[in-house]
Amino acid sequence: MTRRRALVVRGGWEGHRPVEATDLFIPFLEVNGYTVRVEGSTEIYADATALADTDLIVQCMTMSQITGEQVAGLATAVAAGTGFTGWHGGIVDSFRACSDYLHLVGGQFATHPSVPPCDRRGGEQDAFLPHSITITDHGRQHPITAGIEDFDLVTEQYWVLHDDLIDVLATTTHPTREWQPWHRPVTSPAIWTRHWGAGRIVVTTPGHSLDVLEHPSVRTVIERGMVWATRTASAS
């Protein structure tokens, strides 16, 4: 059996522990028939030959920068059938200044609301809020999220700016709070897919820390998403 080829691209802001986070999923890929290559920068995206031979890209690269050549190479590969997936800031808080990348992914981190001012202590837990991830009707039928029930987390709750080319599998709702300036609840996509040319993209917004990535529902979604995004026979 021909092994599929996965490329893990990791780096950027160390707060999301890109090495440890991606290391959680490399064994899953290997057990499921992938040969895994790991790169510590986006320079590989400018290598058209390498990307043409790649069936799946798993990216964990928070913030950072990307060149025009690199993002063009990534977008070309995805349009030709290479799958693209990731979680949290490693995919939707990447390359903030690059509009072409934002266009490819279809959503961008805007903020994660905080606890009341009187409870803030100046650490990352200031943004840890209890919230729910709600599976949509479409998500209940989709192979990535079928059979997964709504679940609760206490971690960063991403507020995402997005377009309507994404297919939303799960949402999360930011309620009104007296210390916040918005005046009605705001629902953001929490898990989505996107078809781009012959390629498939999967974004999972939970995943700030290793314990969240190890949550059974989050981990299942990410692992199923990697398989679903992988190049299909029709794209080969």
Image: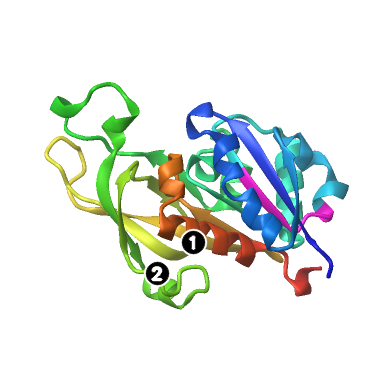
Which badge, 2 or 1, is on the more N-terminal residue? 2
Identify the residue under disc 2: 148
Residue 84 appears in the picture as rendered: no
Residue 28 appears in the picture as rendered: yes
Do the residues bearing badges 2 and 1 touch, measured as CB atoms within 8 Å? yes
How crowded pointer 2 is (Cα within 10 Å; few <14, some 14-19, many 20+) is rated as: some
Residue, x 56% and y 64% (percent of image)? 224
How far apart are the two marked residues, 2 and 1, measured between alpha carbons?
A: 9 Å
Q: Nearer the viewer, residue 60 or 72?
A: 60
Residue 151 figure quarter: bottom left
Side (left or right) of 182 relative to 67: left
Q: Assess whether residue 190 is covered by the magenta stretch.
A: no
Could you tell me residue 230's position as x and y percent?
68, 63
How crowded pointer 1 is (Cα within 10 Å; few <14, some 14-19, many 20+) is rated as: some
Side (left or right) of 208 relative to 114: right
Residue type at tag 1: Thr
As drawn, 97 above or below 107: above
Residues in magenta?
52-59
Q: Assess whether residue 53 is covered by the magenta stretch.
A: yes
Identify the residue under disc 1: 220
